[in-house]
Image (spheres, rainbow, N blue to C red):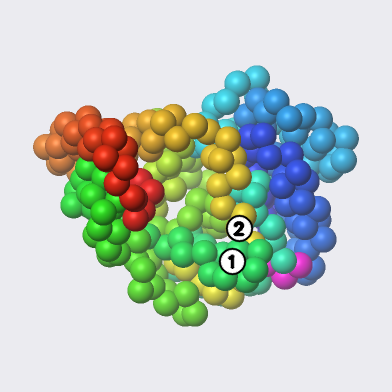
Amino acid sequence: MNLSIVIVSWNVRDKLRENLKALFESKGDFEFEVFVVDNNSHDKSAEMVRNEFPQVKLIANQENLGFAKANNQAIKKAKGEFILLLNPDMKVFPDTLINMLKWMYKNKQASVAGCHLVTEAGKTVKHVRKFPKISDQLAIALKIPHLFSRVLNKYLYVDFDYANAQEVDSVRGGFFFMRNRKLLDEQYFIWFEEVDYCKQIKKVNGQVWYTPTAKCIDYVGQSFKQVKRGQAQKYFRDSQLKYFKKWHPIWQYWLLKLAWPVGLMITWIGGRLKVKRKAKT
């Protein structure tokens, strides 16, 4: 078995159907299996998978376990030489999987790799990131990018060259090609789990790569569109703090923890004054 594909799904039935259909239309001489881990969707996603894609290995959870824990459920059962964590709102091209496999077999230095993500219109989705630092994460907590969006340019790697393969800090978890079965850290419900994984890889002298050899359509955040902004921000804050507590000096964790109430107050004041935002954080 060359590849195990793991899709964690939550209330995106139609995009999930499109995703699965594209996967099974893939070209190339290789073997793969597909897991769908449904996090208690209420749109009958699990029923759709069970009825329309019987070849898929379905794990239907009775509650929303979050991204990391749900992925781990399938990773533990996976038989593939490689594992691809794939968001349900992705759509591979016929040659996406074979191109990534060929690249991974050739580039044995890569423990993790991401491909060239594009919108439906073919525009590059900028997803390569630098590892979080206290300066950029503090700016996010304090809502500074709402007024000065360029403050995150270095963290967001806005000048990254998506035309060339190169080693990077981290790639988007929505298309996350892994060489081993190392589990995600389940303390993260959503956000930062893929950054944490890349950090762990780097810690043991592994490498994370971006390659334009393969392309994949990214519809970007279809599940999260259903989450209220306040709840989504809480998920982000909680994961950010856990990441800093794990990887950074404890004073940085406490600085961020104290900054968040200040940031919320700034947001409230800005809303009262009707200040126009330049970025969403």
Q: Residues within 10 Å of mark 1 (few under 14, many from 20)?
A: some
Q: Which residue is mark 1?
A: 118
Q: Which residue occupies the extreme top position in the image?
A: 62
Secondary structure of the residue carrying tag 1 is strand
Q: Residue at x 66, y 64 (%)?
A: 120
Q: CA distance from mark 2 to mark 1?
A: 6 Å
Q: Which residue occupies the extreme left position in the image?
A: 251
Indicate left or right for 243 with 15 as reference.
left
Residue 148 is inside the magenta segment: no
Indicate left or right for 162 with 24 as reference.
left
Residue 102 lies in what quarter of the image?
Answer: bottom right
Q: In the rendered image of this protein, does residue 34 appear above or below residue 49?
A: below
For the residue pair 35 and 153, the one nearer the viewer reads as 153
**Prevailing secondary structure of the magenta residues:** helix
Q: Residue at x 29, y 59 (%)?
A: 149
Q: Which residue is mark 2?
A: 218
Indicate left or right for 46 with 268 as reference.
right
Q: Residues within 10 Å of mark 2 (few under 14, many from 20)?
A: many
